[in-house]
Image (cartoon, grey):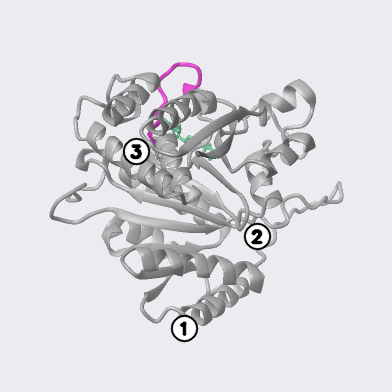
Amino acid sequence: MSTHFHIAVLEGDGIGPEVVAEGVKVLRTVAARLAGVAFAFTAYSVGAGEYRRHGDPLPAATLESLRGADAILLGAMGLPDVRWPNGVEMTPQIDLREKLDLYSGVRPIRLYDEAHSPLRGYSANGTGRHIDFVIVRENCEGLFSERLTPRPAGRDFESDTLKITRRGAERICREAFKLARRRRKHCTLVDKANVLPSMAYFRRIFDEVARDYPDVTTDRVYVDAMALYLVQRPDSFDVMVTENMFGDILSDLGAGLIGGMGLAPSADIGDDHAVFQPSHGTAPTIAGRGIANPIATILSVAMLLEWLDHPETVRGARLIERAVENVLADPANRTADLGGVVSTAGMGNLVCQALS
Ligand code: ATP
């Protein structure tokens, strides 16, 4: 008898539908190679487009349905010209993290081809220096914590609060240490503990949690210095844990190191639910042209399969990663962001061919 997994699919806005189509195509292809597991997909309309049509970017009924899914695959959400009256964009993907308590933002940064990086001297495989680290971003508090708090009108200032709770810091640090244990056993705290009391508190909790993982080595780096080190010596990092906004910024920097947003997958994981999506946004300037790179979404599908934690889905995750490695090993297989001519669908097809 097969184990059935129900996958909720949220294409979203901009390039979301284009890259999600390739992610689903790859998931269906790999599923055919797995024994004893079956997938059912249900699509839901969420995002700026849904707001335009019905006035709510994340309808309550949809949220309830998402709670029943085994995993959620998301494209990208928000459009620059669809905004709330206070001027900020629709961000249902951030609302989802908070409502489903997806506190752990896992963002692997791995170089697949030397030529993709603006840095010199980093190889994808074999000998030499590698770029292969994971940013673990706290997703539910930090500088985003008061973003939805109503503000009195007419003030001549606005402020945002960087809130760190013991519970929030402890659980994200624990996730980072657990991940480091499965990798090269090194965990770096990225903070601003020299200036901000909230960050000094985060550091105290990191140090407490570190005592439970004596086999994992640690270091502590200020976020401004980390921006420098990521360019100078990205190979010296394994897992890094940080607050919400710092993680947001550093994951784009990390994506830049490996060839751009089209190559950077992510997972937003809680204790009961998880959303898998490329790290990138809706890229409205290239939407609808069939040129977006779907690799970030395809690698997010691999993360989804790994998270489902069935021996066959975990095998599927490895098959997708290997297929992506094989496809990207050929310099002819490049989408426009990497200087090539392969279309979004063409790249999805190449990964499917490599799988079969
Ligand atoms: P958000 O704030 O929602 O994260 P953003 O404004 O930071 O979004 P993105 O939409 O992530 O921006 O795009 C950043 C840059 O990367 C843009 O130049 C965009 O065209 C490019 N980009 C993003 N995703 C892809 C992709 N899948 N393929 C090719 N280029 C991409």
Stretch of the chain drawn in magenta: 286-295
What amino acid is found at the position of numbered circle 2 in the picture?
Glu
Picture quadrant where residue 138 is located:
bottom right
The residue to which callout 2 is attached is 141
**Mark before the other along the chain sequence, 3 or 2:** 2
Q: Nearer the viewer, mark 3 or mark 2?
A: 3
User: Does 199 lie within the magenta span?
Assistant: no
Residue contact between numbered discs 2 and 1, judged by CB atoms under 8 Å: no
Give the side of residue 161 with respect to residue 269, left or right. right
Instruction: Measure how far apart labels 3 and 2 are at the Cα level.
Output: 33 Å
Q: Is residue 11 visible?
A: no
The residue to which callout 1 is attached is 211
Note whether 110 is above or below 103 in the view shown.
above
Quarter occupied by the C terminus: top left
Q: Nearer the viewer, mark 2 or mark 1?
A: 1
Give the secondary structure at mark 3. Answer: helix
Q: Residue at x 55, y 62 (%)?
A: 243
Instruction: Measure how far apart labels 1 and 3 are at the Cα level.
Output: 36 Å
Q: Nearer the viewer, residue 38 or 215?
A: 38
Across and down, in percent, residue 269 comes to 56, 53
Across and down, in percent, residue 18 comes to 49, 23
Across and down, in percent, residue 20 comes to 50, 28
Give the secondary structure at mark 1. Answer: loop
Q: Nearer the viewer, residue 275 or 79?
A: 275
The residue to which callout 3 is attached is 320
